[in-house]
Image: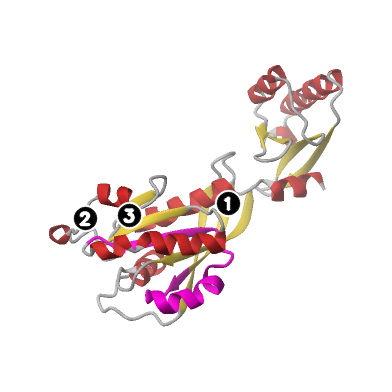
Amino acid sequence: MPEMVTCLSLEENGTLPDELIDVMKDDDWVPLKGKSAFVLKWPRATENDPAVLKEVTDRLLRVKLALKGIGMQHRFSTMEVGNEDRIKMKVCLVGDKAVGKSSLIRRYVLDQFDDEYLKTMGSKVSKKTLVLEHPRDGREIRVDMTVWDIMGNKGLADLLMSSYIHGAQGILAVCDVTRKSTLEGLEGWIGDGLKVTGNVPTHVLVNKADQHDDFDFSRDDVMGAINAGSNVTFTSARTGDNVEAAFHDLAMSILATYEEKDIVEKITA
């Protein structure tokens, strides 16, 4: 169902007084990240309830008069928008061979596990559609995620990396908890990926976590081997433990980095 949204666009580099920001916060205005703009979503009852309509109009008038009082150039735009936005995400998995990248994707996309290891030739693309709640304003976001799997032979992967990972908004770096060497190589995989993508969200998946008796390293070892700011999740493609959560967490991290420019342009056009 469509809803009414008002966008307030300020003059370039405009800075609001703290007292006005406080008023707008109380009135449920949401600042748009990276933009001199705010969005106010109208209550769904507005259209059929004159009292609610007056309340929203009063909110707009208060802010308009305050901006006029401080002499700040601004523009209000109100339009009807759907309550669901749709975006595309490209996610790439990197890591040594046989760490379980293909199995993780299969578990996530199809909820299946194949015990027989199949070598991944080149790269393979899978698709998954999910619905997320926007971390800033609670909007429903429908995500069309493409998940790219590259073979783990580092020499050949170097040749494919640029074209494979170009345009990715997030990276899942996968290692095998039963082989410490796969952890030791992870920093190189991440570094090579970020050279192409720039600074995108990167989460580390420590796979085969169901094989408790065969652990070759600990969480502390992981944190010592990679950037401490990275998100680390122990997963099992075999049992499905934490697999969906890992992909979901990366998607939410990506969503949080999105500039709100699309909705700003749509509303203020």
Pinpoint residue 97: horizontal percent, then vertical percent: 33, 73
Q: What is the residue that sits farthest to the left in this orientation?
A: 213
Q: Is residue 153 magenta?
A: yes
- Select label 2 or label 3 by which is in front: 2
Using a 10 Å C-alpha cutoff, classify the residue at mark 2 as few (fewer than 14 neighbours), some (14 to 19) or many (20 or more). Answer: some
Q: Quadrant of residue 202?
A: bottom left
Residue in view at x 69 percent, y 17 percent: 19
Nearer to us in this view, 75 or 174 = 174
Q: Is residue 197 visible?
A: yes
Q: Which mark is residue 242?
A: 3
Q: Is residue 32 above or below residue 233?
A: above
> In this rendering, would 47 be left or right of 241?
right
Q: CA distance from mark 1 to mark 2?
A: 38 Å
Residue that label 2 marks: 217
Q: Is residue 151 visible?
A: no
> Contact (CB < 8 A) between labels 1 and 3?
no
First-in-chain label (1 vs 3) = 1
Residue in view at x 71 percent, y 39 percent: 35
Pinpoint residue 219: horizontal percent, then vertical percent: 26, 49
Residue in view at x 33 percent, y 52 percent: 233
Which structural element holds mark 2?
A: loop
> In this rendering, would 130 be left or right of 185?
right
Q: Is residue 98 magenta?
A: no
Q: CA distance from mark 1 to mark 3?
A: 22 Å
- Select label 1 or label 3 by which is in front: 3
Question: For the magenta stretch, what is the residue range?
Answer: 148-177
Which structural element holds mark 3?
A: loop
Residue that label 1 marks: 141
> Contact (CB < 8 A) between labels 2 and 3?
no
